[in-house]
Image (cartoon, grey):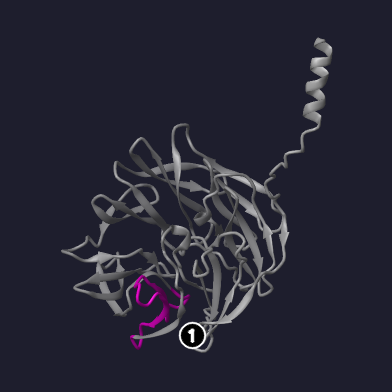
Amino acid sequence: MEYMGRLSRRVFLLGLPAVPTIRAAPKGLQLPSAARRFLDPLTEREIWRMTPLSNPHFLPATHHRFTNERNSVLLLAGRQGDETHAFRMELPSGRMTQLTQGPDLHGLSLCLAPDDRSFFFLQASSLKQVGLRTLREREIYHLEDGWSLTGDLSISIDGRYASVVETREGLYRLRIVETLKGKNWPVAEEKSPLARPQLRPKRDQVLYSQSDPPRLWLVNLDGKQRQAVRPRQDDEEIGPERWTSDGKLILYPHYASRKSTARTFNPDTRQEQILGRCTQFWGLMSNADNSAIVGESRSKVGPNIYVLFPLTEREITICEHASSRSTPETEPRPAFSPDSQWIYYTSDRERTPAVYRAGVADWVEKT
C-alpha cells in the first residue's frame, strides 16, 4: 500500500500542466525597429517615437554621452519585467540590440566611452564597462561591504576617470575611480545626500551638489581645494546644473520673482551671466559650440521642448513633450545630438515612457 501511495502521488504530479519558466532576455538579443513618425500637435514638426510601447524605455542622464559622433548609434535603457537593461539602437533604422543582463542596473548611469566602442554603467555594487559590439564586460570597481550606489555616475571626457556616489547608514561619499586600473579614492563625505557629480571637461575637478543645505561644491580630483559654487540667495531656485562642453561655465535654469532665465556661472572668475528669459526650463543642455540651448518646460500649461539662442535671446518652441515628469524615467531630459541637428528626449505622452527625437536642422546650425 505504501508503494502504491507513492506511485499515485508521482503519477498525480506528472499529470499536472507544466508551469512556464520566465527567463530573462539574453545579452545580444536583437529587436526589430518600432520607430513611428507623427506630426507634433502643437508645432506640426515631424517627430519620431523611436522605441516600442510594449516596455518602458528612457534616456540616460543628460550630462552623459549617449549618441556617438556620427549620430549612428543611440544608447538607451529599457525595462523588461523587473530588470532594466542597456540597449544599442542603430540610427536611423531604429533596430535595437540588448547589451546587458542581470538585475539592479541603474538606467540613468549609461555613458558612452570617448572612442564610441564601449560604454560605462552602474549595476548592483559595481562600475562596469561593456563593448558596444563585442559585449565583453569588465568590472572596474566594486563597492566595499555595507555600502550601496545611489546611481549617480560621471565619466570624464577622456574616459580616464569616473565619479560615483556611495551611501551607508546616513553617510554619503563621493569617490573618484581610475577606469583603466580601478584605483580609487574618496574626495568628499557628508551626512546629507550628495548627488549629480560631473567631472569638469579639460580640468581635474568634479562638481557635485549637496541637499542640506542646498549648495554646489567644486573640488579637485585629489580632494583638495574644495570651494562652494554660487550659494543660493533669498527665495531663488536653481535647477539641475551641467558643464558647458568646453568646461569653462556651469549652465543652469534660474527662478526668482516668477521669472525664469537660463544662466551661466564661471567658477574661476565667480561671474554670473544671464543668457536670456526662458519658459520655465528645468532640464537643459547647450550644444557643442554653446550657440543653442535646449530645455524642457516644467509648466503644466505648456509642457514643451524649447530652444533658446543666447546671442539673440530668442526662444522657439520645438514640440510638446507632454510628459508627466512623475519619475526620473519620465523626465524629458532633452539633449542635442553631437552635430546639433537632432534633439532626443523621453516622454510618457502615450502612457509608457519612450524615447523620441525631433529634427532641428531648420533652426540650429550644424556643429
The kind of residue tagged 1 is Val
Quadrant housing the N terminus: top right
Q: Nearer the viewer, residue 17 or 191?
A: 17
172 horizontally vs 118: left or right = left
Residue 110 drawn at (x, y percent): 54, 56
Residue 355 drawn at (x, y percent): 55, 68
* Residue sitting at x 35%, y 72%: 300
| Residue 269, magenta (yes or no) | no
Residue 236 drawn at (x, y percent): 21, 66
247 horizontally vs 143: left or right = left
> What residue is disc 1 on?
364
Residue 349 drawn at (x, y percent): 49, 70
Q: Is residue 107 above or below residue 167?
A: below
Q: Could you say whether the residue bearing mark 1 is in a helix, strand or loop?
A: loop
Which residues make up the magenta segment?
286-313
| Number of other residues with Cα within 10 Å of mark 1, as a class: few under 14, some 14 to 19, many 20 or more | some
All told, the count of numbered labels is: 1
* Residue sitting at x 77%, y 38%: 17
Q: Nearer the viewer, residue 302 or 213?
A: 302
| Residue 294, magenta (yes or no) | yes
